[in-house]
Every structure is written in C-alpha cells, then in structure tokens.
Amino acid sequence: MREGCHIEEVGDRLERAVMSLAHVPDDPKSLYDTYEQTAIEILDSEFMNFPEGILEQYLSVHLYCLSKKLGLSEIV
C-alpha cells in the first residue's frame, strides 16, 4: 500500500476526472454511466494502493450516493 494515500481523495479524483472530460453528459443516466466508467478505471489502476476490497467498496458507496443525488433510484 502506498504511504500517505487517503481514501477520501479518491472521490475528489473521480470528480475531477469526469469534469475534465471534453464532453460531460447532460442527462443524469449518461452522467452516472460516465462516473461509473471512470470509477472502474480508477479501481483498475489504483486497487493495489489500498487494503483488499477497500477501494471497491468506497467507489461502490460513492456511486450509490451519486445515483441518489441524480435521482436515479432504478440503478440501485
């Protein structure tokens, strides 16, 4: 595990990554899908920096909260 790596930074990185895209979707479902794909990319590239299962669980909860915020109750 990388020293000084904090799980709360992952949500910020996810937000910055999505908002820095050339095209950020307007509709909630497409925006959620973009966040989900980006979260998968973060998970694939950073899973080894955290104890087993922690990053996956954090991203899962983060996406759940985002789906509620976007009014997408059918996703969860």
Image: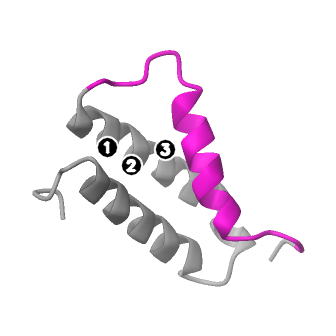
Provide the secondary structure element on which disc 3 rests: helix
Disc 1 marks a residue whose amino acid type is Tyr
Q: Are marks 3 and 2 in contact (CB under 8 Å)?
A: yes
Disc 2 marks a residue whose amino acid type is Glu
Q: What residue is pinned by disc 3?
A: 38
Magenta region includes residue 52: no
From the viewer's perspective, is residue 56 above or below residue 70?
below
What's the distance in space between the residues labelled 2 and 1, CA to CA? 6 Å
Q: How many marks?
A: 3
Left or right: where 42 falls relative to 57: right
Magenta region includes residue 7: yes
What's the distance in space between the residues labelled 3 and 2, CA to CA? 5 Å
Left or right: where 67 falls relative to 57: left
Disc 3 marks a residue whose amino acid type is Thr
Nearest the camera: 47 or 29? 29
Q: Which mark is residue 32?
A: 1
Q: Give the magenta part as a residue range.
A: 3-26
Q: Residue at x 26, y 33 (%)?
A: 30
Q: What residue is pinned by disc 2?
A: 36
